[in-house]
Image (cartoon, rainbow, N blue to C red):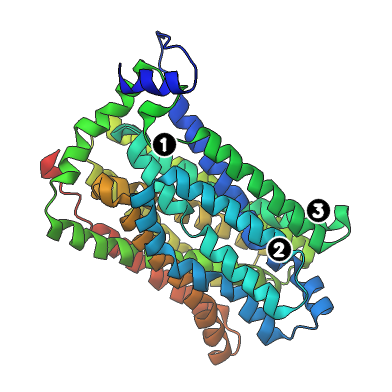
Amino acid sequence: MSEIEQGRFAFGQADVKHSHATNVRWYIFVIVFLLVVINMVDRTALSIAMPSIATEFSLGPAMQGLILSSFFWSYALMQIPGGWMIDRYGARTVITMSTVGWGIFQTIAGFTTGGISLLLTRIGLGAAEAPLFPAGAKLNSNWLAKKERARGAVFMDSGAPLGAAFGGVLISWLILALGSWRLAFIAAGVVTVLLGWIAWRYLRDNPAMHPGLNEAEMDIIKDVGETTQVAAESEPSHILRRSLVSLVAGRTGWAMINFGLLTWGPSYLAQARGFNLKEMGGATFVIFLAGMFGSLASGFLADKLLAAGYKRSIVYKTLLGITGVGVAATFIALPHVSNPVIAVAVLSATLFLLYFGSLYWSLPAILAPKSRVGIVGGTMNFAGSVSGIIVPILTGFILQWTGGSYGTVLGFFAGCAIVYVIATATIDFNESHT
């Protein structure tokens, strides 16, 4: 009896032959996409509710900043251990534990009584959310053929800007509808726990053990196991180490921009462009929605070029290089734009180009052997998480030092984009094996 037949027998289903391949692998990534969206909604909930919370708990600006940044302390710290757990116990188990865990911490936040207890729930939330993206990279390695990995990576990562775009609107609506930020947090937490249960029911680490998979789809998945992954398993360790350095440097440059815009973007719109709260919310929605479309466009374009016969190194370095330079150009141009509507359009173009960087989430599965995809993904995301801690503070110092000049901040982001481009260009895809 084959592994697929065994998996179906275990779920009490007969082995039925199909003339066409099933699409279980894409349903897997639909679930991961939804988890990423909820991940971002739960992250941003506190920022939306903070004015109400600060009044209720009598929190000063310093304590508010400390609570808002505390998420990234544990999130960064747990990236590499989380990657190890994924490689050791499997993505399904870790994703389920992660999702249920952050849902519980989000729910507990609704019962907090002061700044310290709220801070502790944020630390717990960061630790619980940490393994999600590296686990998605692991599923990419296990479930997708070489020709599909870019699409899988960006489909997962596109949930981040979509969650950022909808998070503020959704949490604001919940607070207004339920009449309480506490009830909004509890509702969001319960939904997250439910999604954790769904993830456990549907996800599998081994495609052969999924009851909905047929032989035709398994043949598609096996293509990567017999070609690319053999090369990755035999890749010299010094090549992987060199690529990992480039991966970390590139992700750091990208994350500095991404988290810089997430944390200081609304303030830029309000202070430098004079937007009121309603205008700021609408502009933020449009800007990050453009990021989602950029993320999806990068994956489909990359896979299309790969299918046309272009080398992966050429495709990735060209797409990421051109868009990275484009991001730098928009930051240089933005201080010279006086019309606020055009400024939002430029920022939307910035996010569209920036989120071509979602392709980075396919790189752990491409560069590392299956047994190390989790730890490589965790290391890469650790660099991004540390950037999430540093860049809000660094941006604040730049603004204070320059008397509130956002032009200097935008110049700094342009420099980060150049670092991102140079680091990406030095990644060794070691295509002599393929």
Q: Are marks 1 and 2 in contact (CB under 8 Å)?
A: no
Report which residue position mark 2 lands on: 108
Q: Is residue 266 visible?
A: yes
Question: In the picture, residue 404 is in which quadrant?
Answer: bottom right
Q: Residue at x 49, y 66 (%)?
A: 75
Q: Earlier in the sequence, mark 3 or mark 1?
A: 3
Rendering coords of residue 180 (x, y %): 85, 61
Q: Residue at x 54, y 34 (%)?
A: 201
* Three-letter amino acid code of the residue under disc 1: Phe
Q: Is residue 287 visible?
A: no
Question: Where 95 falls versus 52 (above or below)?
Answer: above
* Three-letter amino acid code of the residue under disc 2: Ile
Q: Earlier in the sequence, mark 1 or mark 2?
A: 2
Question: In the picture, residue 148 is in which quadrant?
Answer: top left
> Callout 3: helix, strand or loop?
helix
Report which residue position mark 3 lands on: 173
Quadrant, the C terminus: top left
Quadrant, the N terminus: top left
> Callout 1: helix, strand or loop?
helix
Question: In the picture, residue 120 is in which quadrant?
Answer: bottom right
Question: Where 62 falls versus 272 (above or below)?
Answer: below
73 relative to 253 in the view: left or right = right
Q: Residue at x 27, y 45 (%)?
A: 370
Q: Which numbered disc, 2 or 3, marks the residue closer to the eye? A: 2
Label 3 Cα crowd, 10 Å radius (few <14 / some 14-19 / many 20+): few
Q: Residue at x 76, y 66 (%)?
A: 49
Report which residue position mark 1 lands on: 300
